[in-house]
Amino acid sequence: MYNIDFKNPVKVYFIGIGGISMSGFAELLHSLKFDVTGSDRQKTGITDHLESIGIKVFGEQVAENITPDIDLVVYTAAIHPDNPEFDAAKKMGLPMMERAELVGQVMKNYKTAAAISGTHGKTTTTSMASHIFLKAGLDPTISVGGILPVIGGNIRIGNSSNFITEACEYTNSFLKFYPTIGIILNIEEDHMDFFHDIEDIRDSFRKFAELIPDDGSLIVNADIDDHEKLFAGLNCRVITYSIEGDANFTSKDIAYDECGHPSFDVYKDGSLLGRCTLAVPGLHNVGNALSCIALSSVCGVDFKTACDALTEFKGTNRRFEIKGKLNGFTIVDDYAHHPTEIKATIDAAKRYPHNELWIAFQPHTYTRTKAFLQDFADVLSEADHVILTDIYAAREPDPGDISSKDIADLLEKAGTDVTYLRSFDDIEKFILKNLVNDDLLITMGAGNIVDIGEHLLKS
């Protein structure tokens, strides 16, 4: 295994440098005086930013980009062996490293390395924790899977011994990390193109928990089924939280303002700490906030500072992000692409002022759509109107046996008003024709469905 010497910068090439995580770590290495270059299949705002700070980005992935003077090639799990750059690096015998391994090696440089895991909520919770650390003056290095306004991007390079990052379970990536503090937000079926079943997923999270050193801390959502099995026999400090159940950190007397923002009393081991108010909607964010309050306690941040930071946190991009108003209706964008996430977003939307709720949904990956077909229909049926477009393939080839029309058929059988339109242009025309004053439109999915709202607001 190649070990990076962070005191001796070398030339590093990133295959897929435009990814939200890859770009952040490319920028981090660049800040440490590494000679960083990379490629992506399309130029974006992210690649434009990298080029603006002096990182050369190739707009296509070809073998000629890989040269013998490269000391290390970093790639993502989405890069296949037949990728021309990957293949060229292999043939040259260049040292190669998957992105998660790079993250792990970076984490070794920090005394406090907090890794936030879970099937859902990682980006929001990492962002909340980042706000708290910044408010407390802990000057953290931050890697977040979204654009966080307070840091002006997806990476912040601090000058302290504190590091905060998301920890994704897909392809067991987070098992290559070196956390001193771990958070497990939830565990559900997802990424079934990699995991066999829920027990396989639980086993992965158990192995993540085992990464925490004896003098470290593990923060676990006590609402996870059989959550004790995740840490049974471990020597690290274990802290639990629950929205309303039995745990070290709990919430009571939850109330909502006119926009669906919750406020709640926080208890630690049965003693009232005080009341916390959030500026992001939804009951699920109460749980996310509790995990961050528990993290704050571990890191010596007082309760008031943590709550003040949470009150100031207004979310990240693509997480119930209010994009604007058009013709009297409101456009919100949300990254939700799993049935549980969709339900949480719809529940939050129901508390937000509106007339009729419209969901424009783009399913993400064929395997996920097939695995949760009925679940997607069940949760989407809670909206007043649903607009479906084609599945965003991401890393997958089309198997030919699943499509968005299958969700539409189930919604029709359930009596839900649903429209299936393949083209974004047709969807935009449909929205302009059918939505009226005070309606709420949520463009939803992990693909490029966000483009619809943004294009409408620019038109």
Image: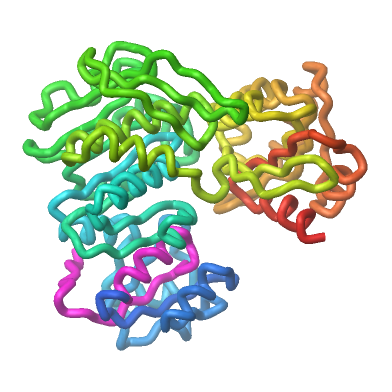
Query: Quarter holding the N terminus?
Result: bottom left
* Left or right for 237, reference 119: left
The answer to which quarter of the image holds residue 413 is top right
- Depth check: 64 or 408 in front? 408
**How many labels sit on residues?**
0
- Depth check: 324 or 69 in front? 324
The answer to which quarter of the image holds residue 456 is bottom right
- Depth check: 295 or 309 in front? 309
Q: Residue at x 82, y 51 (%)?
A: 423
Q: Residue furthest right?
A: 433
| Residue 153 visible to the viewer | yes
Q: Residue at x 56, y 25 (%)?
A: 257
The answer to which quarter of the image holds residue 11 is bottom left
Q: Residue at x 40, y 71 (%)?
A: 14
Q: Is residue 2 magenta?
A: yes
| Residue 372 visible to the viewer | no
Image: 296 above or below 39: above
Residue 297, x across and y down, in percent = 20, 34
* Left or right for 330, reference 161: right
State how the image is colored.
rainbow
Query: Quarter holding the C terminus?
Result: bottom right
* Left or right for 459, reference 3: right
Residue 348, x across and y down, in percent = 59, 28
Q: Is residue 272 magenta?
A: no
Q: Residue at x 18, y 36 (%)?
A: 298
Residue 93, x across and y down, in percent = 29, 77
Image: 109 above or below 206: below
Residue 26, x across and y down, in percent = 37, 70
First to last magenta residue range: 1-30
